[in-house]
Amino acid sequence: MEYRTIRQTTLILIPFTILLAAIIYVYYRAQPSPTCFDKVKNQDETGIDCGGSCMNCALKTKQPLKVFYVKFDEVSQGLYDVVAEVRNPNIKLSAAVIPYEITLRDKSGFTIEKISGSSYIYPLETVHVIEAGIRAKRTVAKVEFKITDSSVMWDVREDIKVPDLIGGDKEVLKEARPDGSVITILNAKIFNRSILDYDAIEVAVLITDAEQNVIAVSKTVIAKVRGGEFSPIVFSWQGDVPIDINKAIIEPRLNLLKK
């Protein structure tokens, strides 16, 4: 009797098993294939729809560059210097190309002059973008600095170590000329604290007053600084520029992001 019951039960279960298997097969065949846009962590992804064969997670979750301030100074009549402080809030992302546009406006808001430029930035870096000697036909009342986020060339470059360069040993001198004019000189040194030799080091200097107003800027390039050594550098301005050494920002940089 037990054998007969087992046999009957087995015969009944066989078609149900086949039917269940068919339903499961059809269900999974009807499911869409995993993609990088299905809002599910699948395939070889390391995050939801990112990593692995999908977009790098750092690129997918990137934050835009932050412009903290834009300042300008009239060096002489009709000649202006502009400084923008830009910060990169991303931990892993560098930007090899940052296209920017600077617009000078008069008190009525009309455009006086517009120039374009490009910079670069490393992860978590703060840089000062300087455009010196911009000519304007009218008095400048406002300056705008704009970065088009869609044009920034982001990349994950874990193979690059940011050059360990610093400025120091600052000294201010005043040099009187026979005609009675004065030249303000800022002497400094650029130290290469790495073991690598670096060529074409870009150096910017930013001078502000007690109220953080820009009173002088300058840029230059050092041909080479060997690892563990330093290079002297000199900046000069016409006139008696009141420089507080503690407020003189010297920013040596090297672009290793070029491919």
Image: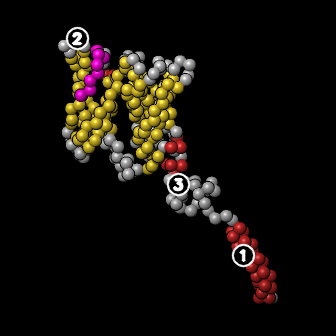
| Label pair 2/1, CB-CB below 8 angstroms | no
Toward which corner of the image does residue 238 lie, by quadrant? top left
Name the residue tied to disc 1. Answer: 21
Tag 3 secondary structure: loop
Give amino acid for label 3.
Met
Spot occupied by residue 230 in the image (x, y as percentages of width and height): 21, 36
Q: Nearer the viewer, residue 37 or 254?
A: 254
Question: Is residue 64 part of the magenta span, yes or no?
Answer: no
Tell me the kind of residue under disc 2.
Answer: Gly
| Residue 180 - label | 2
Q: Residue at x 40, y 50 (%)?
A: 157
Q: Quick one: label 3, few (<14), some, or many (20+) residues within 10 Å?
A: some
Overall secondary structure of the magenta section: strand
Q: Height in image: 122 above or below 175?
A: below
Q: Is residue 218 visible?
A: yes
In the displayed structure, 242 sits above or below 62; it is: above
Which of the pair 46/151 is nearer the observer? Answer: 151
Q: Residues within 10 Å of mark 1 (few under 14, many from 20)?
A: few
User: Quarter holding the N terminus?
Assistant: bottom right
The residue where tag 3 is placed is 55
| Sequence-first disc among 3 and 2 | 3
| Total marks in image | 3
Residue 236 highlighted magenta (yes or no): yes
Amino acid type at mark 1: Ala
Number of the front mark, 1 or 3:
3
Going from the N terminus, do you reach mark 2 or mark 1 first?
1
Residue found 52% across the figure and 60% down from its top: 53
Q: Which residues are magenta?
A: 234-241
In 3D space, how far apart are the residues under numbered discs 2 and 1 (Cα atoms)? 99 Å
**Element marked by disc 2:** loop
